[in-house]
Image (cartoon, rainbow, N blue to C red):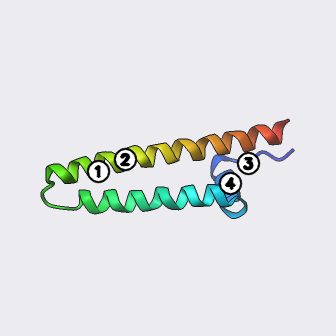
Amino acid sequence: MEKFSQDELRAYLMQSNEEFRSLAEKHAEYARLIDQIESKPHLTEEDEMEEHRLKKLKLHLKDQMHDMINRHRASQVA
């Protein structure tokens, strides 16, 4: 059976799995929002709180995507 690298498996899931694609799109959007906040010359307390909130959400999505990759990989081995 062919083994996929992490990047190849991610690309495959991006094409074939709507849920994974949705998670990845949200993850990218949070990354863009974080970049916008971090590009400001001075951060307010609200900016810092929003940055922290977005980073938590982004990490949660990353964990979900990683779990999906692991489940897919395990299903291919079984």
Q: Is residue 4 left or right of residue 7?
A: right
- Frontmost of labels 2 and 3 is 2
Residue visible at 42% across and 47% down?
A: 57
Describe residue 74's horizontal placement relative to residue 26 as left or right: right
Image quadrant containing the N terminus: top right
* Circle 3: residue type: Phe
**Secondary structure of the residue carrying numbered label 1:** helix
Indicate the quadrant where residue 36 lies.
Answer: bottom left
Of badges 2 and 4, nearer the viewer stands: 2
User: Looking at the picture, which amino acid does disc 4 mark?
Assistant: Glu
Between the C-alphas of marks 1 and 4, the distance is 30 Å
Instruction: State the residue position of label 2.
Output: 55
Q: Secondary structure at mark 3?
A: loop
Give yes or no for contact between labels 2 and 1 (Cβ–Cβ under 8 Å).
yes
| Residue 2 drawn above or below residue 36 | above
Please tell me which residue lies in front, 4 or 61: 61
* Residue sitting at x 62%, y 40%: 67
Q: Residue at x 52, y 62 (%)?
A: 25
- Residue 4: give its label: 3
**Which label was assigned to residue 51?**
1
Task: For mark 2, give the secondary structure.
Answer: helix
